[in-house]
Image: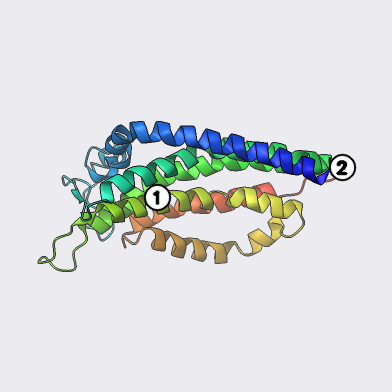
Amino acid sequence: MSFWAHLEALRWTLMRIVVGYGLLVAVCFIFMPAIFSDVIMAPAGSDFILYRWLNGLSGDGTLVPDFSRDFRVSIISIQLTSQFMTHISTALWLAFLLIFPYLVGELWLFIRPGLYRRERRGVAAMLLFGIPMFYLGCAVGYFIVFPFTFRFLAMYQLSADIPNMISLDSYIDTFIMLIFVMGVVFQLPAVTWLLSKMGLITARLLRTYRRHAVVVLLILAAIITPTGDPFTLLTVFLPLYLLYELSILLSRRPRSPR
């Protein structure tokens, strides 16, 4: 194909992505009030699935957080345009989350003809593994990481004289950030597998630095969920550590036949 033919193909690829994204934004905008009430705001109340599942745990916060108390946080809007702008921005964010596999697929179809057969197989395998892992990470962020973090920060008080008033913008920013961060973190096995195929890292190297990785992952888990109790720390640390072990497994080179 000539240079202009490539440009024309890229133009149609981008047009299909933009049209599909625009349609999804419109659908998300229409249904956003119901999505917001039933999904996005769900972690702000005691009837959230994680809180109901851990309802039997009643600790003092030192070792185990207290899930026996009724929990409900009122989110307030402190700016005139906050609710309308949040409606738009959340529709844009959710539409991107939904169209992500289609976007990757369109880009893959565009670059696929320029790759060698071995490169095609490698990239295709990475995409088939990476996209489900991204959504799995988002699910872990929604069902585990964000609820733990939000519950701790919403109930934390420096002084009894300072009531917590959580703004809508603060809630949404933290919600989106933690979910996307976990989606990106769950790409670790796919990225590690690709780097191992390129010969940049090996399973032996990852095993050698396993103890260092454990310390780094513990620090990362503590940063993501600054609750201070071991139960929450280990709940977030365990999926991260399993990702590291999966990375080691995927980096192993098959033994050559004798």
**Disc 1 from disc 2: Cα separation:** 48 Å
255 on left or right of 234: right
Residues 169 and 14: in front is 14
Q: Residue at x 65, y 59 (%)?
A: 206
Residue closer to the observer: 80 or 225:
80
Q: Residue 37 placed where, x, y %?
A: 27, 37
Q: Is residue 122 visible?
A: no
The disc labelled 1 sits on which kind of residue? Ile
Circle 2 crowding by C-alpha within 10 Å: few under 14, some 14–19, many from 20: few
Q: Which mark is residue 225?
A: none
Q: Position of residue 135 (x, y in %)?
A: 50, 40
SS for tag 1?
A: helix
Query: In the rendered view, would you say 61 is above or below 138?
Result: below
Residue shown at 76%/49% (left/top)?
Answer: 253
Task: Give the x, y percent position of residue 34.
Answer: 29, 32
Do we see residue 75 in this rendering?
yes
Looking at the image, tell me whether mark 1 or mark 2 is earlier in sequence order: 1
Identify the image quadrant of residue 7.
top right
**Residue linked to disc 1:** 176
Classed neighbour count for the residue bearing mark 1: other residues with Cα under 10 Å, few (<14), some (14–19), many (≥20): some
Which residue, as the protein is rendered here, is positioned at the far right? 258
Where does label 2 land, which residue? 257
**Residue 61 pos. (x, y %):** 24, 58
Residue 229, picture quadrant: bottom left
The answer to whether residue 95 is left or right of residue 39 is right
The amino acid type of the residue labelled 2 equals: Pro
